[in-house]
Amino acid sequence: MELALYITNWCKITNQAVILKNKKETFEENFTNFAAFIKNLYKKEQVNYPKFYKMDNLSKLGFLSAEMLLRNSGVLNKYGSEEIGVVVTNSSSSLDTDYDYQELIRDKSNYFPSPSVFVYTLPNILIGEICIRHRIKGENAFFVSEKFDPEHLGLYVTHLFDQGKITACICGWIEVFKENYHSVLFTVEKIEEKVEDRDYNAGSLFNVDNIYKLYKN
Amino acid sequence: MKKVFVAGDNMITSLGFTTNENIINLKDNIIGLKILDDHNLTPVPVPLSLIDPLALEYHFIKVLKDTSSDLSPEGFTKLEKMFLVSIHDAIKNIMMDLKGKKSLLILSTTKGNIELLEKENKKHFDPKRLYLWEMAEVIRKAMGFFNPPLIVSNACVSGVLGIGVGYRYLKSGNYDHAVVCGGDILSQFVISGFQSFQSLSPEPCRPYDISRNGLSLGEACGTIVLTSDSAAVEGQRVIIEGTSTSNDANHISGPSRTGEELALAIRSSLKEAHLQPSDIGYISAHGTATPFNDEMEAKAFSIAGLKHVPLNSFKGYWGHTLGAAGVIESVAAIHSMKKDILFKSAGYSNPGVPEDINVITKNKKNIFDHLVKTASGFGGCNASIIFGKS
């Protein structure tokens, strides 16, 4: 029995639409901004997690992506919390919140604003939010690249599996800058390879072409 | 899987512009943290470890001459200059093709050129330079690296993680060499943020000490050159033996209460290295000197079976240097191992953590073969890496 890395589930959020492995949800309502859209999605999904309202937009998008990705996936039950990795990439790091924070300290009378804004000026906080919510304790990494880089994401996550660090991974791209947003998050697992998948591009094998297709389409 | 060797390094801190200058100052226990009353950076005086701007200019002009480019110093931000000076110094005596197709540049930073958000800095540079990939591209181009750089931005574990990422790529044979460079500078943005948390100490920080009262900030840049080509490494060979990261899954701005997750990362690194805790001769710890961080680390070292291993934090010398910390502290730790010396943990005099850990109180000679470097940061992240003699 040969084992191979598969994309076992995915969740993509962009252009006011949520695309899951088995369904696509679009909103009829036209939201004026990202904040309104993501709040609406949170309510629609009936997630009861008041801390959501304290998060910045980047963490909100990452949090909801993970929520919908993991809801019916079984990954959290199948693997130990220490064996699951979270690897996230994006283009603008935490610049969306960095601009807000700089505005706050421009006002010298408010030079020491609330630490709750400052803490979100690090992109990996969204990994922390996902880990807290789902009790995940395994490998973490946050990478920044101009454009989505499926080759690097594929290689790094594959190395974590091959070098014995993880048995499952949540990985992808979570990007928010002002009104531009795009997220795609995958679960990757090592499972029995189907003969018909031996053809490089078949099925949902975790390879560069498939990762890119899910990001793009 | 290939072996991964350390082929060269550099560190730029308030204690010097080369590894050698820094090591000489560490041997003399010179503290780089100075109480600074500069209203451009902070409304209240706090100890900071700063890079001398004139010295940086001097070193940078030398780099421009050596690279025989038509670039001018005005075209680079302070952090970009530090990256370029550090990389240039680290690779200058290494006879390998470090810039070609089989070589990878990895940059670790938490905030990059964030000071460009300040009004007075806006006019000099394109706001695009705030994007980490644009900053990385400027560095790549100026140095002439072939491949696009990889950028790690994972809070205060960025430096250790950057070295770990390079190790994984070389171990698996994707590349033959990696130049890993970590850097961050101090700005209103960063200092005010830590002040908002009330986590800055009014005196130079005192990791693990009973009277510790918060962290001190510093700016720095460091480079470590990795290769899988053992023949190219001169002198005592040092290899990377294992590395791991973990998450506390507890709080975004406070450490784990138990230390179990940092211990998990250490144990996973030991397993990859095929080592027992008793094989470890020294820990270069994170040691920020905040009450909770140091407590968490002490618990973690105890859980990981490393309670009695001699340990220091370099933060008492040059403060918490954010994305640079993991790189410069790894470089200092590697040179400790090569030179058989353990440096005093600056600022420490009386035990102040729950476990009876072995903090180094004065420089001493010690011959050892393996060391652990750890880091922890916001977002609940932890990282550990093991270096050993080969």
Image (cartoon, rainbow, N blue to C red):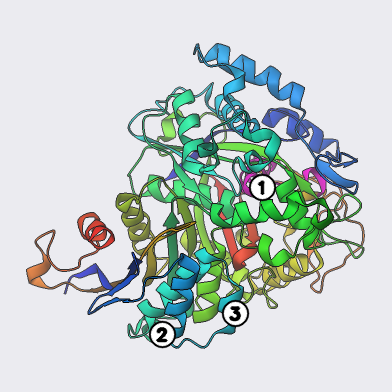
Indicate whether B324 appears above or below B266.
above
Provide the residue designation for mark 2: A45
The residue lying at 77 percent from left, 48 percent from top is: B217
Q: Amino acid at mark 3?
A: Lys
The residue lying at 43 percent from left, 65 percent from top is: A165
The residue lying at 82 percent from left, 49 percent from top is: B316
Mark seen at residue B325: 1
Q: Quadrant of residue A197?
A: bottom left
Magenta region: B316-336
Can residue A137 be spotted in the picture?
A: no
Q: Position of residue B21 (x, y in %)?
A: 74, 28
Q: Position of residue A198 (x, y in %)?
A: 10, 64
User: Which chain is indicated by disc 1?
Assistant: B
Q: Position of residue B231 (x, y in %)?
A: 42, 30
Give the CA separation, mark 2 to mark 1.
41 Å
Q: Position of residue A90 (x, y in %)?
A: 43, 54
Seen in the image, is B221 located left or right of residue A179? right
Chain-order first, disc 2 or disc 3: 2
Indicate whether B264 appears above or below B169.
below
Q: Secondary structure at mark 3?
A: helix
Indicate whether B247 appears above or below B161.
below
Q: Amino acid at mark 2?
A: Glu
Q: In the rendered structure, does residue B145 fall within the stretch colored magenta? A: no
Provide the residue designation for mark 3: A51
Q: Nearer the viewer, mark 3 or mark 1?
A: 3
Can residue B64 be spotted in the picture?
A: yes
Q: Amino acid at mark 1?
A: Ala
The residue lying at 61 percent from left, 59 percent from top is: B279
Give the CA separation, mark 3 to mark 1.
31 Å
**Quadrant in the picture for the C terminus of chain A:** bottom left
